[in-house]
């Protein structure tokens, strides 16, 4: 995520608690979604997976906004 902005992301992760919290939550959701998609979604409602994906996108949008403001 944000491969072309690694330096800014690294700086924000150490200097901005809110950014770090959002970043960590995004990564947690990313891992969970990937795990569920690999295992199949039989043990979770499809709408629950979609809800998680929307939340992940919202977090990514916020991260993008914070990175853009820091540039």
Image (cartoon, rainbow, N blue to C red):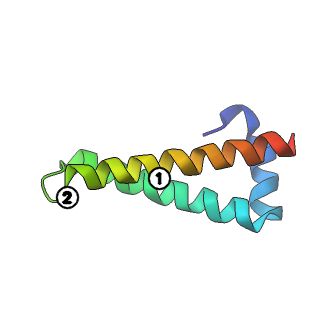
Residue 10 is tagged as none
Task: Answer left or right for 5 relative to 30.
Answer: right
Disc 1 or disc 2, which is closer to the eye? 1
Q: Which residue is mark 2?
A: 44
Q: Element under label 1?
A: helix
Q: Position of residue 66 (x, y in %)?
A: 76, 48
Instruction: Give the residue drawn at x 58%, y 61%.
Output: 24
Q: Position of residue 33 (x, y in %)?
A: 35, 51
Quarter of the N terminus within the rendering: top right
Q: Position of residue 65 (x, y in %)?
A: 73, 43
Q: Dot 2 surroundings within 10 Å: few (below 14), some, or many (20 or more)? A: few
Going from N to C along the chain, the mark reached first, 1 or 2, is 2
Q: Residue furthest left?
A: 42
Q: Residue furthest top?
A: 4
Instruction: Give the residue drawn at x 28%, y 56%.
Output: 48
Quadrant of residue 17 in the image? bottom right
Total marks in image:
2
Task: Answer left or right for 15 relative to 37.
Answer: right
Q: Dot 1 surroundings within 10 Å: few (below 14), some, or many (20 or more)? A: some
Task: Answer left or right for 18 relative to 43.
Answer: right
Q: Element under label 2?
A: loop
Instruction: Give the residue drawn at x 83%, y 63%.
Output: 15
Give 71 or 58, whichever is nearer the viewer: 58
Q: Which residue is mark 1?
A: 55
Q: CA distance from mark 1 to mark 2?
A: 16 Å
Q: Position of residue 21 (x, y in %)?
A: 64, 65
Task: Answer left or right for 52 relative to 14.
Answer: left
């Amino acid at each position: 995520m944000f491969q072309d902005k690694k330096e800014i992301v690294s700086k924000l992760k150490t200097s901005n608690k809110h950014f770090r919290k959002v970043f960590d939550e995004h990564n947690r959701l990313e891992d969970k979604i990937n795990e569920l998609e690999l295992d199949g979604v039989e043990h979770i409602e499809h709408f629950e997976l979609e809800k998680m994906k929307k939340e992940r996108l919202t977090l990514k949008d916020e991260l993008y906004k914070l990175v853009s403001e820091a540039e």
